[in-house]
Image: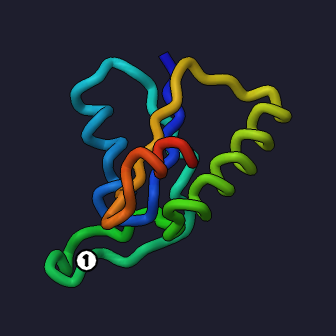
């Protein structure tokens, strides 16, 4: 099973696919975030992680763009996981947005 992951730009979201990979028998492909984010200050020896910084509206727009591009290129998956920290936002409105 191939699972695409679209995630916001926090440290937890950027690394969540590693946790999923450890516990689920699927092939996870991180579609977002992209870019490089330095390791957290409290873990100076940790490697940098991929990062984009998208959340809320910007994440929804980036997901649409990435999906359109990938599907146009003939890529396919069996499932999609979207991770976004709602912070103080209403979770229902964020769910509807995504």
The foreground one among 90 and 15 is 90
Which residue is farthest bottom? 41
- The way the protein has been coloured in the rendering is rainbow
Residue 91 image point, x, y percent: 37, 49
Residue beneath disc 1: 40
User: Could you tell me which residue is drawn at 45 percent across and 32 percent down?
Assistant: 28
On screen, residue 81 versus residue 69, left or right, reads left
The answer to whether residue 15 is left or right of residue 33 is left
Residue at the spot 14% in from the left edge and 80% down from the top edge? 42
Query: Residue 41's x, y, as percent?
Result: 21, 84
Q: In front here: 20 or 81?
A: 81
Decide: few, some or many residues near mark 1? Use Cα within 10 Å; few <14, some 14-19, many ≥20.
few
Q: Is residue 67 left or right of residue 33?
A: right
Q: Quadrant of the C terminus?
A: top right
Residue reaching furthest to the left: 42
**Is residue 86 depicted above or below 17 in this figure?**
below
> Which residue is painted at 80% across and 27% down in the image?
74
Identify the residue at image location x=17%, y=75%: 43
Relative height, residue 61 to residue 36 (above, below): above
Q: Picture quarter containing residue 78? A: top right
What secondary structure is marked by label 1? loop
Percent coordinates x, y for residue 22 in the rendering: 24, 32
In the picture provided, is 66 more to the left or to the right than 14?
right
Q: Nearer the viewer, residue 46 or 2?
A: 2
Instruction: Report how many numbered discs are placed on residues in the image.
Output: 1
Looking at the picture, tell me which residue is in the foreground, 40 or 86: 86
Residue 97 drawn above or below residue 20: below
């Amino acid at each position: 099973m191939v699972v695409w992951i679209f995630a916001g730009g926090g440290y937890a979201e950027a690394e969540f696919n590693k946790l999923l990979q450890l516990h689920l028998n699927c092939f996870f492909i991180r579609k977002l975030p992209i870019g490089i984010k330095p390791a957290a200050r409290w873990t100076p020896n940790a490697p940098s992680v991929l990062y984009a910084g998208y959340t809320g509206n910007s994440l929804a727009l980036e997901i649409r763009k990435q999906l359109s591009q990938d599907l146009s290129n003939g890529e396919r998956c069996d499932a999609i996981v979207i991770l976004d920290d709602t912070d103080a936002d209403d979770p229902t409105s964020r769910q509807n947005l995504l």
